Image (spheres, rainbow, N blue to C red):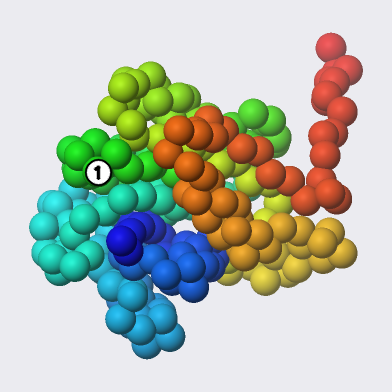
Amino acid sequence: MTRTVLITGATAGFGAATSRRFVAEGWKVVGTGRRAERLRELADELGNSFHGAAFDITDEAGTRAALAALPDDFAGIDVLVNNAGLALGTAPAPNTSLSDWKRMIDTNITGLVTITDLMLPGLIERKGMIVNLSSVAAHYPYPGGNVYGGTKAFLRQFSLGLRSDLHGTGVRVTSIEPGLCESEFTLVRTKGDQAAHDALYGGANPIQPQDIANTIYWVASQPPHVNINSLEVMPVSQSWAPFQIYRGG
């Protein structure tokens, strides 16, 4: 029986790569995102196994309407991949934009818990799976990480809480926590600063979106009695920095 995965944030990066991987493995994919043209391009590429649903995950009414409008042959979701999210800004907290903070919370937390709540009844009925894309920022703070790191820490803890609450239902929940990965992430974070993107990834041999797509597919392909609680993934080039010490008195 063909299974179906819904992937949020499918218009680029992890989401687009994961859509391609699941279609290649014979799954049906519902890809969501704000950029309808990107979804149409992905549908042209992937064919009848892909259905694009354009909506903003921060819009609860739009999310509800899009899920209700799924075609019958895409409506039975077996796996929810909560990938949509973003970071905005690299400044320390006193110099940040409150609107950027709120947008990260609205997208990374509020939008994610909304779509999860809406899909839980069907996932319980189908003994499905939830895969949440957190980050190593959930574990390791860094200057300028402030609210972004906080949202990812929430997501990791939310995943563990879901596992506890869904005990006995057969629903599996995984938090995947990538490190340095080359995608549009830094361009979004820096409002299109290509030099910042190039400086961060240049020479680092970072993780690629396809690596995370492979990881998500591996998690989803485990037998029903196996749950991967959390999975932290870094490129070999990335590890931990020393603690910082201020000596100014």
Question: Image quarter for residue 241?
Answer: top right
Task: Give residue 34's position: percent from left, percent from top.
Answer: 32, 66
Residue at figure coordinates x 36%, y 50% from the top left? 79
Instruction: Using the image as rendered, state which of residue 134 and residue 58 is in the foreground.
Output: 134
Q: Is residue 107 visible?
A: no
Q: Check the picture and name the quadrant holding the C terminus.
A: top right
Q: How many marks?
A: 1
Question: Image quarter for residue 211?
Answer: bottom right
- Residue at the limit of the structure toward the bottom, as seen here: 44
Residue at figure coordinates x 50%, y 34% from the top left? 226
Residue at figure coordinates x 70%, y 36% from the top left? 143
Query: What's the amino acid at mark 1?
Result: Arg
- Residue at the limit of the structure toward the top, as seen here: 249
Instruction: Using the image as rendered, state which of residue 125 and residue 86 is in the foreground.
Output: 125
Instruction: Using the image as rendered, state which of residue 240 and residue 196 is in the foreground.
Output: 240
In this rendering, is residue 221 above or below 28? above
- Residue at the limit of the structure toward the front, as seen here: 1
In this rendering, is residue 194 above or below 67? below
Question: Image quarter for residue 68?
Answer: bottom left
Task: Give residue 224's position: percent from left, percent from top.
Answer: 42, 39
Which residue bears the numbered disc 1? Answer: 126
Q: Check the picture and name the quadrant holding the N terminus.
A: bottom left
In this rendering, is residue 168 above or below 220? above
Task: Give residue 223's position: percent from left, percent from top.
Answer: 48, 42
Task: Mark 1: give few (<14), some (14-19) or many (20+) Cα within 10 Å.
Answer: some
Query: Secondary structure under badge 1?
Result: loop
Left or right of 217, for residue 71: left
Residue at figure coordinates x 29%, y 72% from the top left? 52
Q: Is residue 137 visible?
A: yes
Task: Give residue 170's position: percent from left, percent from top.
Answer: 33, 31
Instruction: Using the image as rendered, state which of residue 56 and residue 143 is in the foreground.
Output: 56
